[in-house]
Amino acid sequence: MLELGKKTSKYHVEIIDSIVKSNADVVYTVGKYSKMINKNLPKSIESFHCNDLDVLYNYLRQNIIEGDFIMIKGSNSINLNSVCVKSKDNM
């Protein structure tokens, strides 16, 4: 969502409603703007924020269990797809 320019902050805050409605159990965020998502989620949703993709990848590897359903949404500008590629390569 970094590609959204001046409205980036606004859209990051607006997506919180969709996350809440999705009944997510856990939300992982990465990067400067997504931190505001992490800070504004209700306490009923467990959340984890980091600024480094390697930290996220290692955290996920240690905490995901069989049967977990993972959805990834992020900006190409932070290269979030690398987390998926690493996971695929290590299966």
Image (tube, rainbow, N blue to C red):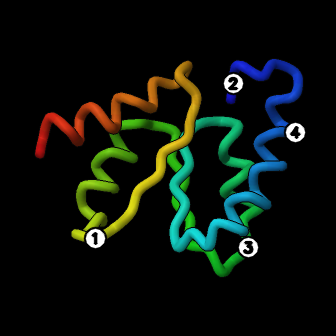
Label 4 to label 3: alpha-carbon separation: 18 Å
Above or below for 73 versus 61: above
Above or below for 78 versus 52: above
Horizontal and vertical percent for residue 91? 11, 46
Q: Earlier in the sequence, mark 3 or mark 1?
A: 3
Crowding at dot 1, Cα within 10 Å, few <14 / some 14-19 / many 20+, comes out as few
The amino acid sitting under disc 4 is Lys
Q: Which residue is mark 4?
A: 10
Q: Earlier in the sequence, mark 1 or mark 4?
A: 4
Above or below for 64 versus 35: below
Q: Which residue is mark 1?
A: 67
Horizontal and vertical percent for residue 46? 56, 72
Q: Which residue is mark 2?
A: 2
Helix, strand or loop status at disc 3: loop
The amino acid sitting under disc 3 is Pro
Horizontal and vertical percent for residue 16? 75, 57
18 or 77: nearer the eye? 18
Q: Residue at x 71, y 68 (%)?
A: 20
21 or 58: nearer the eye? 21
Label 2 to label 1: alpha-carbon separation: 31 Å
- Do residues under tags 4 and 2 come within 8 Å of each other at their CB atoms? no
